[in-house]
Amino acid sequence: MDVSILVPVHNAMPYFQQCIKSLLAQKLSGIRAELVIVESHCSDDSIRFLQSKEQEIRAQFARYTFAVCPEKGAGAARNLCLSIVKGRFVLFVDADDKLLSPEYILSLFKKADAQDADIAVSSMTRIENGKLLLTMPPAHTGTSYREFCRLPGFVAGKMILRERFTGISFPDTLWFEDTIMQLLLVPKCKHVIGVPEVKYGYLKNTTSLTYRKDLSVRSLESVWVLHWILQEAKRLHLPSEYRKHDWNICFDLHFGTLFYNRIRKRSRAEQKAAFLYAGELMREAAKFCKEHSGKGLPLEVRAVWTGNFLLWNSICQIKQTIHAAKTRITRR
């Protein structure tokens, strides 16, 4: 099997209809592709719709598997997907997203195969109310950690060599499980390529975790998932070059405005507790990195390192305001 397309499903209607239709529209001549769909505690019509499309799915794909995940959580569903697949490459597609190019799967596979790549990354288009808002071409590709350690930390929109998942799993029950992409999976890769001509459609689903996480106390798991990943990184004995580049980027990305946005709607006491724990985690990770001393980090991230909560909060608020203003201008 050449490619396995993995779709975990949890209450994704009506977006799931678009997802499946985009998969059925794929041109797959010359390759063997399988579709694996794992249902996780759906209470909407997602599975009823899927059943209505089963005949078309079996005609489109060389192999089709449907499974039910007894555990709750996207991580558990994705782990079950990985335990089933047979393909040389895997492609995760979120149930509320869609592939915008009919040659999406074929193009990613052919480019990855021809260039002996571990990961092939497509362009990503943000869709809101049926409108294409913004297309982001693939960036941070190449053959060195310095070049591709800044790959976006989600698995969707990337075709990944399946053997790179050996020894790696998603945290079963934690939110922000995609964080393994950047901190555990990428370090096992040697070559990442971009395929900008095909596009992955990221649909705005206001009922999804992406849009609900800020309102939940589980937003605090953004720190705990990094603790989990750090323990996994130690267990996997990942390369020293990765330690130098990847965790430096981790500090930059995960403890700046991203961290602020995830916990800013929690109480002041909860924010401060998470902030202080993040500082402890940074210092523990720095020991793992060996070469990292906290120098050269952005000011707001340095504030986490030194425990200056007021400075971190103020800088992140300013950056968030600027980012929101730029986003409004872009959408006009």
Image: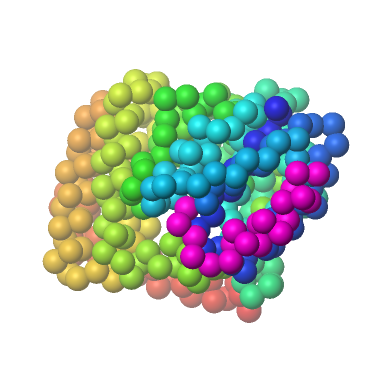
Can you name the residue that lies furthest to the right here?
29
Q: Nearer the viewer, residue 199 or 253?
A: 199
* Image quarter hosting the C terminus: bottom right
Tell me: residue 311, above or below residue 295.
below
Q: Position of residue 331 (x, y in %)?
A: 61, 75
In the figure, is residue 136 to the left or right of 30? Answer: left
For the magenta stretch, what is the residue range?
A: 40-59
Give the overall secondary structure of the magenta segment.
helix
Query: Residue, x 49% and y 43% (percent of image)?
Result: 78
Q: Position of residue 207 (x, y in %)?
A: 48, 70
Residue 260 visible in the displayed image: no
Can you name the residue that lies furthest to the bottom here?
332
Residue 51: say if magenta: yes
Tell me: residue 305, above or below residue 30.
below
Residue 313 visible in the displayed image: yes
Q: Position of residue 260 (x, y in %)?
A: 31, 62
Q: Nearer the viewer, residue 9 or 161?
A: 9
